[in-house]
Image (cartoon, helix red, strand yellow):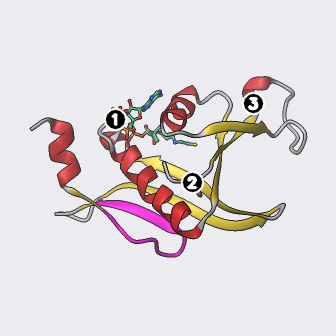
């Protein structure tokens, strides 16, 4: 069994509580990953906004990001919501991860928020149509 497989077996996704979804170590309760979720209706569209998406550094690149994202996609599907998240324009690592999970660039914040004017200081909005069968 690979290290990645053995780590995954040790983890459990907790049901959403107070807008937070967590992955914990099954044996010692240690937090492995979490995301904060917010529901909103925007322009007649039901959205699930991911405010924070974080994997503890010791657990990166072991499949937990995908595990957490799959749990969030299940919520989107069940509630028929479109997913939205923002990511710093310079965070190409996170953008690459989100793109690998089917998210697409939707917009940036240059028209809505003050920033230095530098492209690298922008936030990107990314979206995922969670209402469709994948
Ligand atoms: C970015 C982050 C969420 C990715 O989570 P992770 O647990 O390390 O990713 P996983 O191991 O689950 O990777 C799942 C898949 O995504 C792919 N992937 C991960 N990062 C990628 C990247 N930068 N580009 C392309 N694909 C990527 C992996 O190759 C893997 O594919 P596979 O299933 O075919 O092997 C995580 O590293 C993290 O929390 N980083 C620091 C905090 C951060 O930047 N958060 C986002 C703020 S908006």
Q: Name the residue nearer the viewer: 42 or 3.
A: 42
Q: Earlier in the sequence, mark 2 or mark 3?
A: 3
Name the element at disc 2. Answer: loop
Q: Residue at x 59, y 55 (%)?
A: 50
Magenta span:
13-24
Q: Position of residue 123 (x, y in %)?
A: 73, 38
Determine whether 100 is above or below 130 in the image. above
Image coordinates of residue 32 in percent, x first then y, are: 33, 53
Distance from disc 2 to disc 3, alpha carbons, whole Å, reads 33 Å
- Name the quarter showing ligand 1: top left
Give how far across and how far down residue 29 sits, in percent: 25, 65
Within 8 Å: ligand 1 and the Cβ of disc 1? yes
Q: Residue at x 59, y 58 (%)?
A: 131
Q: Between residues 57 and 65, which one lies in front from this camera angle?
A: 65
Q: Residue furthest left?
A: 1
Q: Which residue is mark 1?
A: 61
Residue at the front extreme?
Answer: 133
- Asked whether disc 2 touches disc 3, contact meaning CB atoms under 8 Å apart, the reply is no
Q: Are marks 3 and 1 in contact (CB under 8 Å)?
A: no
Residue occupied by mark 3:
121
Residue occupying image coordinates x 39% and y 45%: 66
Q: Circle 1 — which element?
A: loop
Drawn side of residue 104 relative to residue 53, left or right: right
Q: Nearer the viewer, mark 2 or mark 1?
A: 2
């Amino acid at each position: 069994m690979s290290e990645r497989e053995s780590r995954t077996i040790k983890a459990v996704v907790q049901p959403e509580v107070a807008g937070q979804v967590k992955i914990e170590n099954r044996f010692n309760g240690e937090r492995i990953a979490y995301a904060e979720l917010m529901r909103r209706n925007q322009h007649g569209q039901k959205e699930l906004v991911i405010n924070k998406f974080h994997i503890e550094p010791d657990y990166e690149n072991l499949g937990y990001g995908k595990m957490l994202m799959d749990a969030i996609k299940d919520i989107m599907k069940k509630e028929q919501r479109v997913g939205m998240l923002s990511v710093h324009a310079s965070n190409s690592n996170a953008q690459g991860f989100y793109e690998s999970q089917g998210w697409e660039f939707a917009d940036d914040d240059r028209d809505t928020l003050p920033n230095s004017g530098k492209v690298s200081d922008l936030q990107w909005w990314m979206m995922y149509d969670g209402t469709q069968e994948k």
